[in-house]
Image (cartoon, grey):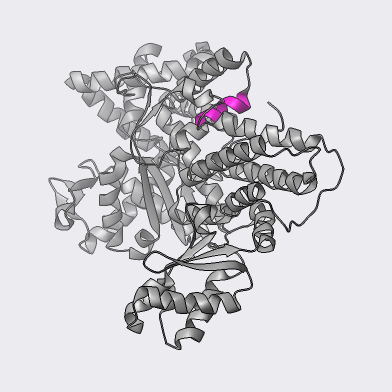
Amino acid sequence: MIANNLKQHIEQAIAKTFGADLDMGRFSVDFTDDPQFGDITTNAAMVYAKDLKLPPREAAEQLAAALRDGLKEAAKVEVAGPGFINIILTDEVLSAMAVAAPLARPRIYEGQEVVAEYSDPNPFKVLHAGHLYTSVVGDAIANLLENAGAKVHRVNFGGDVGLHVAKTLWAMLRELGGEHPEKLKGIREQERPEWMAKCYVDGTAAYEDSEEAKRAIIELNRRVYQIHADDDKTSALAQIYWTCREWSYEGFDKFYARIGTKFEKYYPESSVAELGLKTVQEQLKKGVFEHSDGAVIFDGEKYGLHTRVFINSQGIPTYEAKDVGLIMQKWEDYHFNRSVVITGNEQEQYMAVVLKAVEQFAPELTAATNHLTHGMVKLKGGVKMSSRKGNILRATDVLEAAAEANKELTGQDNEQTVLGAVKYAFLKNRMGGDLIYDPEESVSLEGKSGPYLQYAHARARSILAKVGDRPVPKELHDLDSGERVLARKLVEYPGVVAQAAVELMPHLICTYLYELAQVFNRFYEANRVMGDDREEVRLRLVGVYAEMLSDGLALLGIAAPDRL
């Protein structure tokens, strides 16, 4: 995203210089890694030298001469190395780009409908650190897509039917002494999440250890599906089921409100199970699926994957069939251009089979789907945890660890700082591998952290506050060497935002904002702002810097307070 159509001007210079019909999309125009080599570099001469039957350096010299004559944005054009062309922009152009950078919007998804599905907690189970992670990352990716012009529909999917529900209900009935919904009134609101989590653990253990319990849980699973089929709200079991499902949803809403995440729609598995079942049955007749020991399967081994059951021997749709139903329902609801689904790494092979099955009858939907995965979240020095075993790292555990570390460091209870610390810690690394969360490191005001950037923004705002309402120039022209280095970093922002949106990688924003803050700190230490002859110019740069931090942090879902 180089401003002023610089790449287009280089294309025109190539055509004028060589008079050849060349594929103009092949060369790159980028910011240099080091300002001493100019502001912009292009490999155009090296890309086309072979086509032109010229040595790369000679082709570069000819193209550089044309750019010196015709590129008014350039103060200097030089040939470097084997044939790179480095361009130093005029102060006027660099300044204009810097001032415009915070408001630049890469409209690469203009007019597109995008569904972003993330978080995906299951009712009857506790929210764990993975749900916090995908909520934070999913929200940032959705923000990037919206910023790039897409209409984004944030949706959530969770298992309100299935064996995990039956396991939890089995233990609940034991705790309640049978199907006695009236006894639920004795469970206080603050105790509900822990109680349901304990029941899930107890039910899972019983399912694995006792054949009698396993049979009872399987029967409960069938009864839960029947509750939905009959729209049963009055039977004793139905009252227990609906009440506890609502408890879960209320807990989810409070959690999302706390971290600043909102969803347009929540898809319970029960709402898509019938569509998934119907779709699999229809495609069974067409040979996409096949029978096996009374069940319906998809033979993934034909495609280098593994085989999975989509309808079990009791005729009940499995998770796989429900995911098929979800894909079809999202299409019916939104007719999306793109669907982004974010899950843990353990779902990678599972989703590969589901998408390969759907590809056989709706290839346009799978082609438009991006499945992104992430690893586990662990506390520093922690062990692998599991909700099945009951030693889960809860979402609230992470937030409480951050709050504790921040209180110890600052003596304050500041939710904005805590959320900024956790979100930046989750977002700063490329999504994919496991994440070791260090609470103390995340709240530090030094180093690569959310509070460091929040403080940087507050510091810039405090500088501007000293000016009051005194106007500063809207445009900049002549820049000294220190101002130029800061402006040079500022103009990179639109390109970073565009790349992050294309690659769905919010960590690129994290890295850039940290680097920007470091450049600004060096500038501020070496260049007095208030009371200097160049005060107005420098205040304008400080203002642009503050706007950019605010905008970038907003994309990450992090607050940018004016003071800490």
Q: Residue 191 placed where, x, y %? A: 49, 14
Q: Nearer the viewer, residue 410 or 212?
A: 410
Residue 534 lies, in percent from the top left, at 77, 46
Residue 28 to residue 62: above or below: above
Q: Is residue 317 above or below residue 501?
A: above
Instruction: Please say if 458 is above or below 343.
Output: above
| Direction from residue 529 to residue 158 in the image, left or right | left
Which quadrant would residue 524 be assigned to in this image?
A: top right
| Stretch in magenta | 415-422
**Residue 231 drawn at (x, y percent):** 45, 38
User: At which x and y percent is residue 396?
Assistant: 49, 22
13 and 173: which is toward the camera: 13
Is residue 175 visible from the viewing direction of this image?
A: yes
**395 or 379, which is in the foreground?**
379
Identity of the residue drawn at 63% across and 30% down: 455
Q: Is residue 454 above or below residue 148?
A: above
- Quadrant of the snapshot with the C terminus: top right
Q: Name the residue: 31% across, 39% down.
A: 345
- Write down the quadrant of residue 309 in the picture: top left
Q: Residue furthest bottom?
A: 19
